[in-house]
Image (cartoon, rainbow, N blue to C red):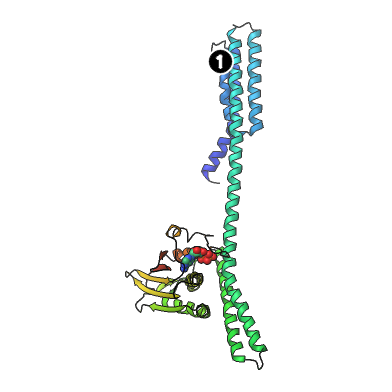
Amino acid sequence: MQPQNLRAMTRASLLPVVAITLAAGIFVADTIADLEIAVPAFYTVVVLLAVRFCKKRGVILVGVGCCALTLLSDLLTAASGSTGIGFINTTISLLAIATTTYLAVKIESEKAAAYEARSQLAHVGRVTTLGELTASIAHEVNQPLAAAVINGNACMRWLAAEPPNLDEARQAAVRLVKDANRASEIIAQVRALTKSSPPKKDWLQINDIILATVTLIESEILQNQVSLRTELADDVPLVQGDRVQLQQVILNLILNALEAMHRTSAGPRELIISSAKNDAKGVRIAVQDSGTGLAPDNLDRLFSAFYTTKPDGMGMGLAISRSIVEAHGGRIWATPNAPRGAVFQFILPMGMEP
Ligand code: ADP
């Protein structure tokens, strides 16, 4: 046990002894000495001490006990033929003890209510954290699973065709396996997160990750009639990090860009993904679109969990992206694009040479 815990326990167990000794001392002084001051008023100290080690009912009992001792003492003093000052002193003391007991009980009730409110708040906090985690898992796993279903259906269609198109069916099956692997990688990450194992620190070429991510959603880009341009600098330094997590960030940004362009019919749909050396200190990745754009008032809220403007949105994508980028020692932000659309950028620090 910690020494300070031991000291606190010793102090707590001594308090009742101190209170009883004090009450006995006051009683003796009040009974023996015929003083012109209200000695029993000091019983208020006993009541206040009782608050430290008793609950509400205990404090009331101590208060009643002190009043009884005051009256007993008054009776004993009167029997020995004392002055009339005793009656006034007793009345003042009884009033003081009763008021102190009432206030002490009130404080004790308020303390109990505050404690209850605090523990309820802590419970809500835990539930919210759990809810956030569940929502993020659902969001992340849902994407590859939905893609796996689409590819599985496509595979069956190619097989059912007359004659069956085995080549297309094989390609759809390959994509299905890729999607399923991605889902299981995400689950593995969640498990790693709960085990709080350190994130992977592989040496990564960010341009490779961008190109791999683009390949993953090439079909959506084509379906949305979006023209994609990649401007990848040759001289970007290697970064240290987790490939799957960084791929997740880029994927989130591209999917958001596609959705933003899908929701507007204004002008051509252009997506530019670029990488560049950032002041010799790291890498800057930017995803630029010509979609609905960003309201300047909402720039701060974009990365908060559950902030969404989409009817079926979860508002987790950017929150997760930010936590990944920050875990890599980087920073992510958004700015409006000219003449329309948005630019989401993040920087990653350059890795130390192995
Ligand atoms: P979700 O996509 O589920 O809404 P996100 O965290 O990915 O969650 O995005 C939060 C919100 O940020 C979106 O609902 C949208 O309003 C805004 N947003 C994100 N990316 C873009 C973008 N490229 N253009 C315009 N708004 C965007």
Tell me where residue 350 appears, x and y as whole percent: 37, 70
Image position of 41 (left or right of 231): right
Q: Is residue 351 visible?
A: no
Q: Give the secondary structure at mark 1.
A: loop
Q: Is residue 237 or residue 311 the one in the foreground? A: 311
Q: Is residue 2 or residue 114 the one in the foreground? A: 114
Tell me where residue 57 appears, x and y as whole percent: 66, 31
Q: Is residue 193 or residue 353 the one in the foreground? A: 193
Residue at position x 38%, y 71% from top? Answer: 283
Placement of 124 over or under 143, stated as above or below: above
Q: Is residue 39 visible?
A: yes
Residue at position x 58%, y 28% from top? Answer: 103
Residue at position x 66%, y 27% from top? Answer: 61
Placement of 182 over or under 322, stated as above or below: below
Say which quarter of the image contains residue 204: bottom left
Tell me where residue 80 appears, x and y as whole percent: 64, 7
Say which quarter of the image contains residue 294: bottom left
Q: Is residue 296 or residue 124 the one in the foreground? A: 296
Query: Mark 1 belongs to which amino acid?
Result: Ala
- Residue count near mark 1 (Cα–Cα under 10 Å), binned few <14, some 14–19, many ≥20: some
Image position of 279 (left or right of 92): left
Q: Residue furthest bottom?
A: 163
Q: Which residue is mark 1?
A: 38
Q: How many marks?
A: 1
Placement of 307 over or under 153, stated as above or below: above
Tell me where residue 222 appears, x and y as whole percent: 50, 80
